[in-house]
Amino acid sequence: MCCTNDVILHYDLLIDEGNDPVHDPEPLQDYMNKWDGQDFINAMQLDKTKSVLEIGVGTGRLAVRVAPLCDKFCGIDISPKTVNKAKENLVQYSNVNLICGNFLIHSFLDQFDVIYSSLTFMHIKEKQDAIDKVFMLLKDGGRFILSIDKNQDECIDMGLRKIKIFPDDPLLIERNISKCRLNIVECFETELAYIHVAVKEV
């Protein structure tokens, strides 16, 4: 991940500014679902035996929908204030573990049945390294569901601040995934994203 301090500051400031997608009004929630939504969650094939990792958990926008459907939920995010907000939003779920850290360098103690990420890989320059780590963290037969933004801008422009990002090319992402022992089983589009579903070979 590049420009890590800038990314942390950006998302900490969003919390200071009152930005929490978990509590967005319905029209904004519908807008955010254009990057993932119910089809994205369905692709996880969740049940009460599954352990799940979300890369870039944010304030818990997706986690509040996923945690009740699985056995164990782990979320990691690089922004301390964002993780604290996620803890507030997910306090009712006893199966949730939230980590403040950089996914690329954090040492996880467990493997997972499902790993997913939405609107996060744009912050990761080292795409192959990230997907290689996903492979290592997945159990045999585990599923990886990745949503990448169709937008190819190289920065997030907030007016008073700009955050450098690394837009994702769906064909390159497919190649990154295929370099691992991950089989792509489904690719589909939403209005604003490309979604890849891959399974780790047994």
Image: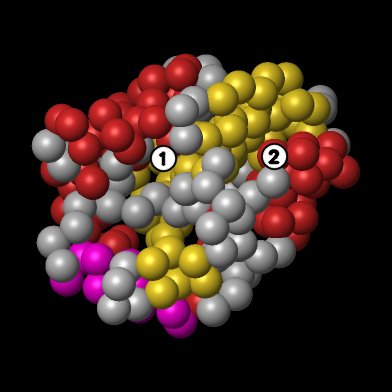
Q: Position of residue 15 (x, y in %)?
A: 21, 65
Mark 2: give few (<14), some (14-19) or many (20+) Cα within 10 Å: some
The amino acid type of the residue labelled 1 equals Phe
Which residue is identified by label 2?
Answer: 170
Q: Residue furthest bottom?
A: 5
Q: Which residues are magenta?
A: 5-16
- The magenta stretch spans residue 94: no
In this rendering, the answer to whether 104 lies above or below 54 is below
Q: Quadrant of the N terminus?
A: bottom right
Residue 127 visible in the displayed image:
yes
Q: Position of residue 39 (x, y in %)?
A: 46, 19
Residue at 48 percent across and 43 percent down: it is 118
- Residue 132 is marked as none
Q: Earlier in the sequence, mark 2 or mark 1?
A: 1
The amino acid type of the residue labelled 2 equals Pro
- The magenta stretch spans residue 12: yes
Residue at 35 percent across and 31 percent down: it is 33
